[in-house]
Image (tube, helix red, strand yellow):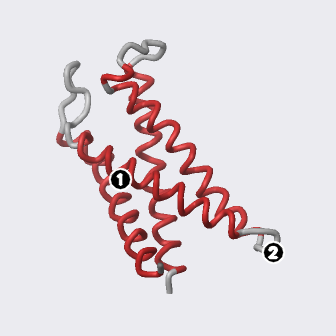
Amino acid sequence: METLKRIIGVVLIVIAAIVAIQTVLEPIYHTSTTDSPNSSTWDYINPLSLISIILGVIFGYIRMSRAGEDASVQEFIAANTLFYGFMFAAIIFLWNWFGISGAGQDFTAVSSDTRGLIWIIFDAALPLLNGAMGVHLLRSSG
């Protein structure tokens, strides 16, 4: 289990770096148009983001459930922040992803500007969550 935790920790950190770098560099190399507001690179990164969210929720729940009554306040807050942070990320990611996919294109209650803002919030939050969970998994695995 310790080796698996180390591998998943590294995977989360790598995905964090990919999302952060793409978020920062996309405005430099991609010219947005009405037909193509975002780089097609996100088509490859979004499934990685979903994988990292699933791993984050699982390991966040494990950490939170282990932080019982005898845990320090710091550990309690860290465990709960990571778990609920990943849950928040899952909700806004899936809402936005389904909204831009074929499954949710008929949902017109929000504009593309709103979806763009949600993506920015998500793309800023996910690397922080992934990085924190990845470092925790690396440190706790030996």
Residue at 48%, 72% (x, y): give it: 135
Residue located beneath label 1 in the image: 20
| Residue 39, picture quadrant | top left
Residue 67, horizontal then vertical, whole percent: 71, 69
Residue 81, horizontal then vertical, whole percent: 64, 56
Residue at 54%, 50% (x, y): give it: 86
Q: Local crowd at mark 2 within 10 Å, few (<14), some, or many (≥20)?
A: few
Residue 28, horizontal then vertical, whole percent: 21, 42
- The numbered dot on residue 31 is none
- Position of residue 37 relative to residue 89, above or below, is above
- Position of residue 26 relative to residue 80, above or below, is above
Residue located beneath label 2 in the image: 70
- Position of residue 74 relative to residue 99, above or below, is below
Q: Residue furthest bottom?
A: 142
> Which of 26/100 is in front?
100
Q: Nearer the viewer, mark 1 or mark 2?
A: 2
Residue 43, horizontal then vertical, whole percent: 24, 40
| Residue 74, picture quadrant | bottom right
The kind of secondary structure element at disc 2 is: loop
Image-based side of 71 in relation to 62, left or right: right
Amino acid residing under circle 2: Asp
> Which of 33/92 is in front?
92
User: Is label 1 in contact with label 2 (beta carbons under 8 Å)?
Assistant: no
Q: Residue furthest right?
A: 69
Number of dots carrying numbers: 2
Mark 1 and mark 2: span between their CA atoms? 36 Å
Amino acid residing under circle 1: Ala
Residue at 44%, 47% (x, y): give it: 124
Image-based side of 30 in relation to 49, left or right: left
The kind of secondary structure element at disc 1 is: helix
Q: Local crowd at mark 1 within 10 Å, few (<14), some, or many (≥20)?
A: some
Looking at the image, tell me whether mark 1 or mark 2 is earlier in sequence order: 1
